Image (cartoon, rainbow, N blue to C red):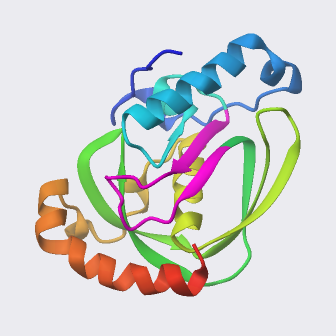
Amino acid sequence: MALLKIAQIGHPVLRERSREITPEELASERIQRFIDDLVETMRDANGAGLAAPQVYEPVRICAIEVKDNPRYPYKPNIPLTILVNPVIKPISEETFENYEGCLSVPNLRGVVRRFADIEVTYWDRTGETQTRVVHGLTAGTFQHECDHLDGKVFLDRVEDTSTLSTWAEFDRFHKQAFVDRIVPFIQRKGG
């Protein structure tokens, strides 16, 4: 496996709509190796997820995993999930405000509104169709990663730019209030 370079905000690859993967491509040794490298890169960077465009590969693949992540100690654990050609559908009107950051937007966080309940349909890395209902903060993680496949970064969804903060200032001034608000939401939504 290899660590991949992560594209930073301003690079055009982050603004392209990624192309769909065919079943033949997904089964190829190159794409399977790429998925391994994507996961390794996400874990090395302590990310909660990483989308293919973030490592200069404009295809509709992303990896999500949260396992006692030090960057997001309040996030519920999510087992490693590979999403290929995902489609997200909100299944309720409820939304929540999430303080988000991104490996492609270093040292910046901001408040983004996300759907609290979604259904995601995708292929797993073996090409099997999966449908999963996801709730709460976990639903926000899925939406964030899938946004990358459409050329969007979380900054595009920040409604109030006064919420933008560096990581240090988030920890100092905003983290406790966010955790106090989001933990009961996670408990209520089960994710």
Q: Residue at x 39, y 52 (%)?
A: 69
* Residue 16, placed above or below residue 147: above
Relative horizontal placement of residue 73, taking residue 140 as reference (left or right): left
Q: Which of 15 and 179 is in front in this view?
A: 179
Q: Quadrant of residue 91?
A: bottom right
Q: Which residue lies furthest to the front in this view?
A: 68
The image position of residue 148, as x and y in percent, is 53, 43
Q: Position of residue 43 (x, y in %)?
A: 45, 36
75 in the magenta segment: yes
- Left/right placement of residue 116 relative to residue 155 reads right
| Residue 146 in the image, given as x and y percentages of width and height | 60, 49
Quadrant where the image shows the C terminus: bottom right
Q: Looking at the image, is 73 positioned above or below residue 23?
A: below
Quick check: 56 left or right of 150?
left
Expressed as whole percent of the image width and height from the top left, the position of residue 167 reads 19, 55
**Magenta span of residues:** 60-81
Does residue 177 sit above or below 144 in this rendering? below
Examine the structure image and report whether residue 14 is included in the region drawn in magenta: no
Residue plotted at (24% across, 52% down): 108
Q: Residue at x 32, y 77 (%)?
A: 179
Q: Quadrant of residue 164?
A: bottom left
Quadrant of the rendered structure where residue 8 is?
Answer: top left
Number of numbered markers: 0
Q: Which residue lies furthest to the top in this view?
A: 29
**Nearest to the observer: residue 168 or residue 105:** 168
Pick the residue in front: 39 or 111: 39
Q: Which residue is drawn at 87% across and 26% down?
A: 23
Give 135 or 162, whichever is nearer the viewer.
135
